[in-house]
Amino acid sequence: MPKTLILIPSRLAASRLPGKPLLKINGLSIISHVFNKAKKSNVGEVYVCTGDKEIYEDVRNNGGNCILTQKEHKTGTDRIYEGFQKLNLSNIDYILNLQGDEPTIDVEDIKKMNSIACKNESDVATLASQINGKEKLNEENIVKVQTKEDLKLKYFSHAIKFFRISNNLNYNNVYHHIGIYQYRTSILKKFVELAQTKSEIKYKLEQLRALENEIDIDVILAKSAPIGIDTKKDYMEIKKFMEYKS
């Protein structure tokens, strides 16, 4: 079985909700909740990659692994690649990039993506879930992915395009994209060395850089989409949900 390393990029300077990773739910920071979900998956070793000492100390104080990177990076993928280089681990076949603001991510979905990506020898793999309701198709904060084939009938399918809003799209095989990626280590190196594309910058979608440079992205169907935390309202809703469940 190929060897996978999970890296979680995290920073305090989120534009819409500064300090987000250290906000508490059930007395534990959001970033430590995500770390614990990743660790529970048993996919591989887990490290948070951050340029902020406050995050570093929080993760370490809660029993997690963390590595300090430079503070400024253009993307989270650049941050995890620096972390990977600093770790200097041998025999790593895949890097799994897990978002640090999605504490409701399903552990089984992490395991499923890793398993299928490894078996298929994917260059890049990601997750997507069903979209419930046509009104969500043009919600800008929901990133969509269109695949070549129906994910309900296949274990995975290649991504055709990613978008936020499009009134002229054929909506066959369109899903809610989940921002978790698994990269073959050689492809991750190639990806971060590529210049950001105009579309990537315009739409704030890193994955467009891969597609525009002919890097295939395999899309795997998840049980459900995790709830990301971008605003104070998101935080309060997820806090209430998670504390109620516990």
Image (cartoon, grey):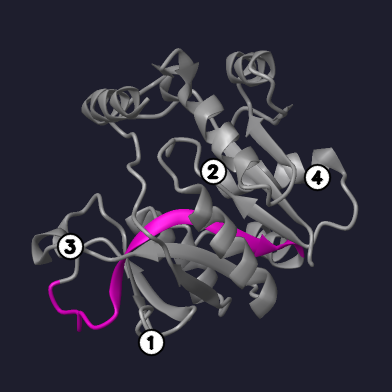
Q: Residue at x 68, y 70 (%)?
A: 118
Q: Residue at x 65, y 79 (%)?
A: 120
Tell me where residue 223 appears, x and y as whole percent. 38, 60
User: Quick check: 186 above or below 69?
Assistant: below
Quadrant containing the N terminus is: bottom right
Q: Nearer the viewer, mark 3 or mark 4?
A: 3
CA separation in Å, label 3 and label 4: 40 Å
Task: Residue 132: give its label.
Answer: 3
Question: Is 199 or 18 nearer to us in this picture?
Answer: 18
Question: Is 200 or 26 nearer to us in this picture?
Answer: 26
* Residue indicated by mark 1: 149
- Residue sitting farthest toward the right: 90
Question: Is 215 or 183 nearer to us in this picture?
Answer: 183
Classed neighbour count for the residue bearing mark 3: other residues with Cα under 10 Å, few (<14), some (14–19), many (≥20):
few
Say whether residue 25 is magenta.
no
Between disc 3 and disc 4, whose residue precedes? Answer: 4
User: Quick check: 242 above or below 199?
Assistant: above
When asked about the image quadrant of residue 189, the answer is bottom right
Q: Report the amino acid beneath label 4.
A: Gln
* Residue indicated by mark 2: 74
Q: Is residue 187 left or right of residue 204?
A: right
Question: Is 184 or 32 nearer to us in this picture?
Answer: 32
Tell me where residue 76 appears, x and y as whole percent. 55, 44
Classed neighbour count for the residue bearing mark 4: other residues with Cα under 10 Å, few (<14), some (14–19), many (≥20):
few
Kind of element beneath mark 3 = loop
Chain part drawn in magenta: 167-185
Kind of element beneath mark 4 = helix
Tell me where residue 33 appears, x and y as whole percent. 51, 29
CA separation in Å, label 2 and label 1: 32 Å
